[in-house]
Amino acid sequence: MRAFTRRRRTQREKTSDFRLSCFVVVLLLNIIPWQPVRAAADGALAAEQGVTAFRAGDYQAALRSFLDALQAGLDTPGLHYNLGATYYRLQRYPEAEREFQGLAPDPKWAPLAHYNLGLTAQRAGRPQQAIEYFEQAYRTTTDPNLRVLAATALERLGGALPSAKTSAVMSLAGGYDSNATLSPDASTVGVSHQGDRFVEALAVASHRLAGDNARAWIAHGSLILRRYAELNQFDVTGSRAGLSYERDSGRVQTGVGAYFDTAFIGRDRLEQVASVDAQASWRLDAGGELRGRYQFGHIAGGGGFEYLDGRQQRLSTDAGFTLASALLRVGYQLELNDRRDLQQGNEFFSVSPTRHSLFATVALRNVSGWQADARGEYRVSRYHDPNLIDAGPTLGILEVTRRDQRYGFALRANRRTTAAWRVFVDYSYYRNESNLDTYDYSRHQLMAGIEAALEK
């Protein structure tokens, strides 16, 4: 689940939340049985009158009836829940919170009490506390309807869903690539302007080895396979294995991990990377989030790609917040490379750029039943040492420092077909412009497929 900063709520959003909360209260009053359990007959009658008044929207009359039932000796969890719901509708949030807090120690009522405590804290202007209550409701409930409501509330506030012990995503897709080069950043691989069809399979999994949602050791693994119909020399195989330690204090989440990645082009190993990854995110009082990340990788190029040997560092920061009905994130990344570079006779080619990237993403959660995500990016690359290019006997050796700029965007839409399965469509376009024509390229890619998300 992504965390985003929440701006001031618009009237439309407030109306939407109001309708949702009304629906929740009415729904729960209908599905939760009220059992007097030997209470006095007049107390039971007063409680029934209170439920009738509540359903009619007369919350003052409902409150009087529920208090009469309590005074008559009826003292059940159902009555206290109805009192809390009524205080909530009357915007008497301290009294509502008191009633729901009284239900929280009861395991049978705890998930529902925590969910309503979240609603109450949200209305009282305490979004961070509301997130914590919604997370408790999501973790502890066995009711699928309440789980969905808690997840929706968390998403509105920018909270993160509690992680399952084991989670996995698998996908199978087919598509078309207009420029089937495996590594446009590796200069001597070149750029192919031949398009081709492909199939792609992806699997990503994580497993909590020890700990809980507050702090845990997590194992990670992933595999991607892409096979082209004709341009087999550009087939992709990539894998990752790693271990991370993650902590979540509610307001601050941190993680540090070690990973080992391997990438192949066709049957040739492109590179192996041993890396460390440290990241942190801060939830803000307004419901938003700030994130920071540092990655350091030691790279070993494969046979024929030894010029990629060296080090790479990435430092990034971004902020997320809501904008109307969309979730928006903007950020910056600095990338530093120190590679062996490529020496071929009298010629020299630098593959050690410093890169600055600006990016923005926007997510729309419901567009006629689809979830839509878009990303835009602009990147500037400056290479450390000038290239030495043999221009022939007349011009001799030319000395040119490479400078690139790349821009592009990606669009993705997915629609859930069952609880675990989704269909998706993905399109991307990138254009690289360089002062050396050899490195100019553009690339369109379109693919569609199915994916499954599993949790246990």
Image: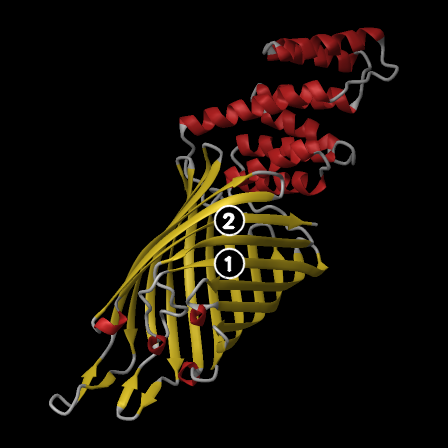
Give the secondary structure at mark 1.
strand
On screen, residue 214 versus residue 70, left or right, reads: left
| Residue occupying the point 71% across, 7% down | 49
The extreme front residue here reads: 230
Q: Is residue 13 visible?
A: yes
The answer for how far apart the CA atoms under marks 1 and 2 are is 9 Å
Q: Earlier in the sequence, mark 1 or mark 2?
A: 1
**Label 2 is placed on what type of residue?**
Gly
| Residue occupying the point 47% across, 84% down | 303
| Residue occupying the point 43% across, 75% down | 312
Across and down, in percent, residue 260 comes to 56, 73
What is the quadrant of residue 328 in the picture? top left
Depth check: 322 or 166 in front?
A: 166
Asked if 145 appears above or below 292 in the picture, the reply is above
Q: Kindly identify which residue carries mark 2.
A: 449
Depth check: 7 or 357 in front?
A: 357
- Disc 1 crowd rating (10 Å Cα; few below 14, some 14-19, many 20+) is many
Across and down, in percent, residue 394 comes to 11, 90
Across and down, in percent, residue 29 comes to 68, 19
Q: Are marks 1 and 2 in contact (CB under 8 Å)?
A: yes
Give the secondary structure at mark 2.
strand
Q: Which mark is residue 54?
A: none
What is the quadrant of residue 400 in the picture? bottom left
Q: Which mark is residue 200?
A: 1
On screen, residue 171 versus residue 235, left or right, reads: right
Q: How is the image coloured?
A: secondary structure
**Label 1 is placed on what type of residue?**
Glu
What is the quadrant of residue 390 in the picture? bottom left
Across and down, in percent, residue 245 comes to 63, 64
The extreme right residue here reads: 38
Q: Is residue 376 visible?
A: no
